[in-house]
Amino acid sequence: MNVLHQVADLGRVPGPLHLAVGVFDGLHLGHAEVIDAASVSAREQGGTAVVVTFDPHPVQVLAPSNAPRLLTSTRHQIEMLGRNHGITNVLVVHFDEEFAAQTGEAFIQGVLEAAPEEGIGRICVGEDWQFGKGRSGNIDLLRRMGEEFGFAVTGVPTVEVLGDRVSSTRVREAVGAGDFDVAKQLLGRDYTVLGTVIKGRQIGRTIGFPTANLTVHSEQLPPTGVYAVSVVGQGDGWNGVANLGYRPTVEGGDVKRVLEVHLFDMSSDIYGEELEVTFVKFLRGEEKFDGIEALKTQISLDVEAARSVFA
């Protein structure tokens, strides 16, 4: 994957460029239409498809108190763009107050100036997407500039699922409610989170159920509880059982929510590795037990229940 971090870097990509531009948090079905439009344009007309996204999420800069948890961190988004969409070039624009002060026209003008000699072949966006200071950029502006500077514009219509517009907000609400079936219909794939394995207190190892503690990259998590999960990391994959919660039996409940996963038939050292976790089935809510022995008994039952999900 060729990841660019400055608009000026676009000049290093073989043109003409076919850009998919947007805040692609979640890479849901609507986002997929925009990205695929750029890919098809590049394939049919020659040149290179480039996804242009923003980090951090603009709301985290413009209205931080209202900023949602992400559905896909930038790292996760890049990984999925390559795996699911065949994208090999991504421009991650750093979004800050200075960048936010640009008008929509100034942003597109900067893109045009940075483009390689072959120029911009097409810009693809959601037809209702707005960008730039005061939301001064929109599909009408792009079409006017396209006529002036010689690039095509695709405004992708809104995608509807279950009678309403697909949006990152709807996906976030579905995941937050534990409704993975709805989330899957909005995403066109299973919802996953990406986390890095960190050192924990290793209590699970002492009771016969070693776990991988994950720090999740600011991504939306489902409700607290125990889940059957499937996990992928560095080309390998496992099934397992996960506890998402506050570990009340061990910690007394006075800690932040954590995700720990017991992976079946896995004994290698994976500290520091990134794991992608799919929540396959909710098994039970988190409970506080009368001591470690009662906890061990319940974990045994959870492992049996999770194994039966994958049988």
Image: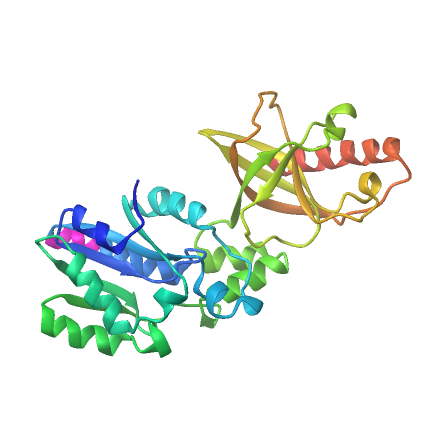
Residue 100 x/y as whole percent: 37, 68
Report if residue 43 lies within the magenta region: yes
Side (left or right) of 41 relative to 252: left
Question: As rendered, which of 188 and 28 lies closer to the eye?
Answer: 28
Report if residue 215 lies within the magenta region: no
Question: As rendered, which of 264 and 244 lies closer to the eye?
Answer: 244
Side (left or right) of 162 relative to 290: left
Residue 77 x/y as whole percent: 41, 49
Residue at 51% x, 56% y is 70
Residue at 61% x, 23% y is 265
Count of numbered tags: 0
Residue 237 x/y as whole percent: 51, 30
The quadrant of the picture occupied by the C terminus is top right
Q: Residue furthest front?
A: 98
Residue at 74% x, 37% y is 302
Residue 262 x/y as whole percent: 66, 32
Residue at 64% x, 41% y is 228
Task: Magenta stretch: give its range.
Answer: 40-45
Above or below, 264 against 244 in this view is: above
Q: Residue furthest top?
A: 267
Q: Which residue lies furthest to the right in this view?
A: 290
Above or below, 177 against 76 in this view is: below
Tell me which secondary structure the magenta stretch mostly adopts: helix
The quadrant of the picture occupied by the N terminus is top left
Q: Quadrant of residue 95?
A: bottom left
